[in-house]
């Protein structure tokens, strides 16, 4: 970094963006799918394509838990809504009872176990975008570092492009390929710049205590339970009294919560010590009906139904954090706003991808013989920008092709995802980067375009059914697959066309045979025959 301030910022933008660009591409692409997280899960469970929410879901779940896990020390119930159409239950057993932890999926209307194929669904991609599915906290630290780097890239990019308004309208398809990639990169960065800034800053908020724990340590020391109670409205479970007592009815508690929350509904119900005299019932408000998702909760006595503790989410610091977190998650968004966020997320993904490609093209012009580093970076571009979409498509294909009753089925789907991605990353080393680009683009086009056909052949949740019944959220997955396949097909065609054009341009002109070469005398005779000017 030398020379003027602007040149230094250009260096930082180019090299800093290259180093974390591949990771950011993965984060943006999988994070964009999180806006359709529940729709993806419903698509991946075609047996429940028409499942709906029920106002009796809480009572039905509790009745089912009395049959399935009466000895548990805690029931944690995640309530269904118009998008999440199954009741998700976590059962925690007391010491000595195995398994110590169980996860159940229940039908909202009657509490019976969900009869559908096991899958991680959209949750797999959602969690991947902030922890990379890496054990421990390594993935979250990497994502945090990448988020800070993206913030730096946005600031330095703004410094570099002083003529922001002019760059907004500058796309020159008739100029050189290098210029076109730069123009598209700049335009995508400027068009949705507010979204990029919002999603980057707010994305650091959910894990801020992991990156900067010193305030938490100063305020609460080694008392994490006190912190969870004060900040997240999650009190520790009380000890059991050892005396049996019936659990109070849930309906009056739901009515009381709705009254206090102005019609809001609970998203989580936590029941500690069910069937014991020391039972408690905690209702936590859902995140999908508000922007600022401060912890609002009510703790009831589990036997009498009396209110014990109320968390009302007051406090400037809590509201600031909850507002940033709510804007990042966008759980309050209706369908049009969610579609707009998906488009913005795809624009951000394309902005990062075009920047990576532009760096390679510009660097290749400087090197007559591509260096190892350039070939490695080009292969990384391919493995991430085409290999990751191939892996996601393989994840969806595995959902349809694996036997529905396969043990550990959801884990096998995830393994297919990583295996496909590994093969895509290995492919350039075996075939060469230039050849691998065209082959992987064609493979991605085939996998995504054929996905709706595979869905029609293997399930009853295909476009002919979902469109006819107005199930637009599920139909949107198939329609998105077709659009994605068409995009990759276009890129593959342009890649093949561009390669053949360059090969023709670089091919030397055929040498003339001796009989076709005019000698000096013939050239003189030809010159004499031409009319003088």
Image (cartoon, helix red, strand yellow):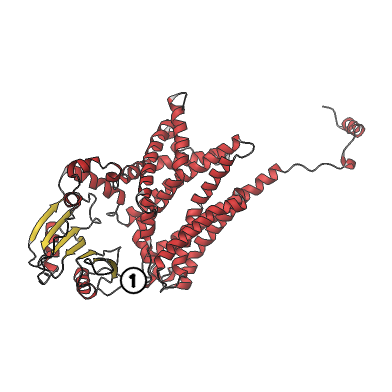
Camera-side residue of 192 and 348: 348
Q: Is residue 439 above or below residue 204?
A: below
The quadrant of the rendering that contains the C terminus is top right
In the rendered structure, the answer to whether residue 32 lies left or right of residue 378 reads left
Decide if residue 86 is in sight here: no
Q: Quadrant of residue 301?
A: bottom left
- Residue, x 30% and y 56% (percent of image)? 334
In the rendered structure, the answer to whether residue 272 lies left or right of residue 498 reads left
Camera-side residue of 463 and 317: 317
Q: What crowding class fits label 1: few (fewer than 14 Cα within 10 Å), some (14-19), or many (20 or more)?
A: few
- Residue, x 55% and y 56% (percent of image)? 489
Q: Whole-percent x and y of residue 162?
A: 42, 30
Tally of marks: 1
Camera-side residue of 58 and 240: 240
Q: Residue furthest top?
A: 3
Q: Whole-percent x and y of residue 451?
A: 48, 64
Camera-side residue of 74 and 362: 74
Q: Whole-percent x and y of residue 122?
A: 37, 60
In the rendered structure, the answer to whether residue 464 lies left or right of residue 258 reads right
| Tag 1 residue | 50
- Residue, x 52% and y 61% (percent of image)? 447
Q: Whole-percent x and y of residue 454?
A: 49, 68
Q: Is residue 292 above or below residue 393?
A: above
In the rendered structure, the answer to whether residue 144 lies left or right of residue 231 reads right
Q: Residue furthest front?
A: 96
Q: Is residue 454 above or below residue 13?
A: below
Secondary structure category for the residue under label 1: loop
Decide if residue 503 is in sight here: yes
């Amino acid at each position: 970094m030398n020379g003027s301030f602007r040149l230094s910022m250009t260096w930082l933008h180019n090299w800093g963006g290259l180093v974390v660009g591949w990771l950011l591409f993965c984060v943006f692409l999988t994070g964009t799918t999180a806006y359709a997280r529940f729709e993806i899960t419903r698509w991946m469970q075609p047996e429940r394509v028409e499942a709906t929410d029920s106002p009796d879901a809480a009572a039905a779940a509790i009745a089912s838990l009395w049959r399935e896990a009466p000895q548990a020390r805690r029931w944690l119930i995640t309530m269904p809504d118009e998008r999440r159409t199954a009741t998700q239950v976590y059962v925690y057993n007391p010491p000595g009872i195995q398994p110590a932890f169980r996860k159940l999926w229940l039908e909202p209307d009657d509490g019976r176990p969900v009869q559908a194929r096991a899958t991680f669904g959209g949750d797999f991609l959602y969690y991947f975008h902030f922890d990379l599915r890496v054990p421990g906290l390594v993935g979250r630290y990497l994502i945090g570092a990448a988020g800070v780097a993206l913030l730096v890239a946005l600031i330095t990019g703004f410094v570099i492009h002083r003529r922001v308004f002019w760059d907004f309208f500058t796309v020159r398809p008739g100029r050189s390929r290098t210029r076109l990639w730069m123009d598209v990169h700049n335009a995508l960065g400027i068009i949705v710049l507010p979204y990029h800034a919002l999603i980057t800053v707010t994305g650091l908020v959910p894990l801020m205590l992991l990156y900067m724990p010193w305030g938490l340590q100063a305020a609460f020391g080694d008392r994490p339970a006190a912190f969870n109670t004060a900040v997240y409205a999650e009190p520790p479970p009380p000890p059991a009294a050892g005396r049996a007592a019936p659990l109070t009815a849930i309906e009056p508690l739901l009515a009381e919560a709705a009254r206090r929350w102005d019609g809001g509904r609970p998203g989580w119900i936590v029941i500690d010590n069910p069937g014991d005299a020391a039972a408690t019932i905690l209702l936590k408000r859902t995140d999908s009906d508000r922007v600022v998702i401060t912890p609002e909760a009510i703790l009831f006595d589990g036997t009498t139904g009396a209110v014990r503790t109320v968390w009302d989410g007051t406090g400037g610091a809590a509201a600031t954090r909850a507002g940033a977190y709510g804007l990042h998650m966008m759980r309050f968004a209706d369908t049009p706003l969610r579609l707009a966020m998906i488009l913005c997320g795809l624009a951000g993904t394309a902005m990062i991808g075009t920047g990576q490609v532009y760096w390679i093209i510009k660097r290749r012009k400087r090197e007559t013989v591509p260096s190892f580093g350039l070939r490695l970076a080009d292969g990384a571009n391919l493995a991430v920008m085409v290999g990751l979409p191939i892996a996601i498509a393989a994840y969806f294909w595995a959902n349809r092709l694996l036997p529905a009753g396969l043990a550990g089925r959801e884990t096998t789907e995830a393994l297919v995802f990583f295996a496909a991605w590994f093969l895509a990353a290995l492919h350039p080393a075996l075939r060469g980067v230039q050849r691998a680009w065209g082959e992987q683009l064609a493979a991605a086009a085939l996998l995504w375009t054929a996905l709706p056909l595979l869905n029609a052949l293997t399930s009853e949740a295909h476009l002919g059914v979902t469109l006819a019944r107005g199930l637009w959220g599920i139909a949107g997955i198939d329609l998105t697959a077709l659009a994605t396949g068409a995009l990759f097909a276009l890129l593959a065609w342009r890649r093949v066309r561009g390669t053949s054009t360059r090969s023709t341009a670089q091919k030397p002109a055929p040498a003339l045979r001796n009989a076709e070469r005019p000698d000096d005398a013939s050239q003189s005779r030809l010159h004499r025959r031409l009319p003088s000017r």
